[in-house]
Amino acid sequence: MFELKQVLDRLVKMGVEDGDLTVIRRERLTIDFTDKVEVCKNTSGCALGFRIALGKRLGLYLSNDITPQGLEEAVNTVVKIARVSPEDPYWVSAPKGLGVTNVDKVYDKRLAQLTPEEAVGIANSIIDGINSSKPGVKPVHGILNVEVLERTIANLSGEEVSRRDTFIVYYATAKAGEGDESATFSDFQQSRLLDEIKPYAFGQEVGFKAYEFIGAKVVDTDVYDLILDERVAASIFNTLLSPAISADSVQMNRSPLAGKIGNEVMSSNVTFIDDGTVPGFMGSRTCDDEGIPVKKNIVIENGVLKTYLYDTYTANRENRESTGNSHRASATSSRPFPNNLILKPGEYDFDEMVEETSKGVYVLKTIGEWLSNPVSGYLNATVTHGYLIVNGSIEGKVKGAVIGGDFYQLMKSKVSGFSKDLHGSGNSYSPHVKLERVQLSGK
């Protein structure tokens, strides 16, 4: 394996005085299954990302060839790119002050050493759970992904940090019934630790829900109180709020929250934090993708916008410090996004939320919210699985209704409460959210 110092020394010899390198080593185990395991694939790789500066001229380059010859070619290429690039007036310097925060439950040795045979066993447990749920319920499709990631970041100031992460995520769809009297249900489970997954129980629940929603009706178009499932709410927040609080979006004038620091942008009972230090959460990590230690950032407090999220580049534009939120999909360019976006839970039990609803819908599953517009803040989502609530009791299953409207108006004038629990979709976490008098478009 190559030494980063040798690459850095070579860059210095070519006149580069500023920049950073990122090494990503990744192992991924993927299983596709239907009613049986169809494909089991194990892949691994290593890539080196360059971000260098000659004055204010930047060179970005990603090399998958880490042989001595490949690295020499990569160094020559990225320097050539920098020399012919236009100056970036906002460039100040690569990140400095690299370090790590102590964060628990982000790397699991057992998960890192999981064999393909053991992964197949997990997939088969999901299949068995679906098959055992209800008569006639069958698995349709599923995917299991296990990822082990090691990232090392080094700058030309002589600083270097590393972190290791493990992830397991699986998804499954089950079908119950036939023809017009049929229903499907899809769900996922995610974790950083092998001991926390329950594949058989997960499969059973997917099967139960598919069976339960046979005969679900399209809800009438009307005004309802809505109770959003935790992961539905989390997915909506990830789609609409996460991009809007990125300083990159703000500086590009692509955020509806631009210029609103200190303003009330949501209801006074709404507090959002970004926290990359929560043990076991999907976005937790010891440092961000530039090597800056992660921390807790209060983004919206009692409805008031307190801060945007920054990486080094966007922070330098405003003469401030990074908030530890760099994300580098390609190991070269960076954008700030939340580590874990978390809506502060409330005081309600879920049953209390239902009991206090005279006419409403509990929204269990939606599709399409990822097509909502984070630039305008317009929400559009279709309810695929929900429960009709009448006089404090669940009275039936519904589907096919569309939720639409201004996300920020909903969060400012329609929010009435949150449950005590907290669940995640990706790196976004939310309790149940109750919204009052929201238009649903159905039949």
Image (spheres, helix red, strand yellow):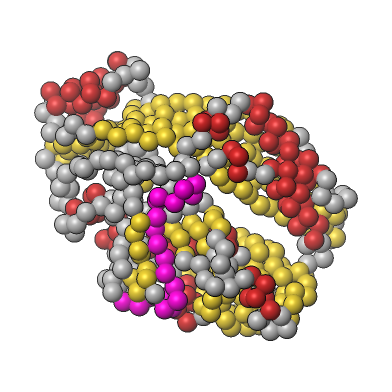
Toward which corner of the image does residue 98 lie, by quadrant?
Answer: top left
Of 166 and 25, nearer the camera is 166
Of 320 and 58, nearer the camera is 320
Quarter of the image that includes the C terminus = bottom right
Residue 159: image location, x then y, percent: 22, 34
Vertical placement of 318 versus 61: above or below? below
Is residue 114 rendered to the left or right of residue 172? left
**Magenta stretch: dominant secondary structure:** loop
Kindly identify the residue that appears in the image at 69 percent across and 68 percent down. Answer: 386
Residue 347: image location, x then y, percent: 54, 73
Kindly identify the residue that appears in the image at 15 percent across and 51 percent down. Answer: 89
Vertical placement of 389 versus 373: above or below? below
In the rendered structure, does residue 267 fall within the stretch colored magenta? Answer: yes
In the rendered structure, does residue 429 fall within the stretch colored magenta? Answer: no
Is residue 268 rendered to the left or right of residue 133? left
Residue 326: image location, x then y, percent: 33, 48
Kindly identify the residue that appears in the image at 33 percent across and 52 percent down. Answer: 295
Can residue 370 be seen? no
Residue 235: image location, x then y, percent: 53, 59
**What is the span of residues highlighted in magenta in the rendered image?**
263-283
Is residue 4 rendered to the left or right of residue 362? left
Of 350 and 83, nearer the camera is 350
